[in-house]
Image: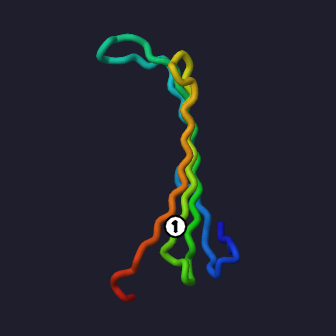
Amino acid sequence: MTAGLGLGASGYFHNPSNRFVWEWDAIDPSTNTSLHNEQELDLALRWQPSDGRWKGLSVWARYADVFSTGTARDTQPEFRFIVDYTIPLLPR
């Protein structure tokens, strides 16, 4: 999806890896005991300008949460906000 954010550059949004995983009836191979059932949710959104002075910039927002029953922490949320910029070293 292409979008302009009023920053002097158009760019695109893209979600590289949104998924939901469900694990059940897992067995620990070293102890041969059953493990707790888990569910994991991963969401990611990325914006990357395609032209203008912001070209080379990449902004990520990522969220992950692991839901598990019978453990010390039933939920383990994580949020990341990542900004990186590629510096062009060679002229085009």
Q: Residues within 10 Å of mark 1 (few under 14, many from 20)?
A: some
Residue 18 in view here: no
Q: Position of residue 1 (x, y in %)?
A: 65, 66
Query: Which quadrant would the C terminus be assigned to in this image?
Result: bottom left
Looking at the rendered structure, the secondary structure element under dot 1 is strand
Q: Position of residue 57 (x, y in %)?
A: 51, 71
Name the residue that disc number 1 marks. Answer: 58
Q: In this rendering, would 84 be left or right of 2? A: left
- Please name the amino acid that badge 1 sits on: Ser
Residue 8 in view here: yes
Displayed quadrant of residue 81: bottom right
Name the residue rendered at 55%, 63% in the picture: 59
State the scheme by which the image is colored.
rainbow
What is the residue that sits farthest to the left in this orientation? 30
Q: Position of residue 19 (x, y in %)?
A: 56, 42
Closest to the observer, 20 or 71: 71
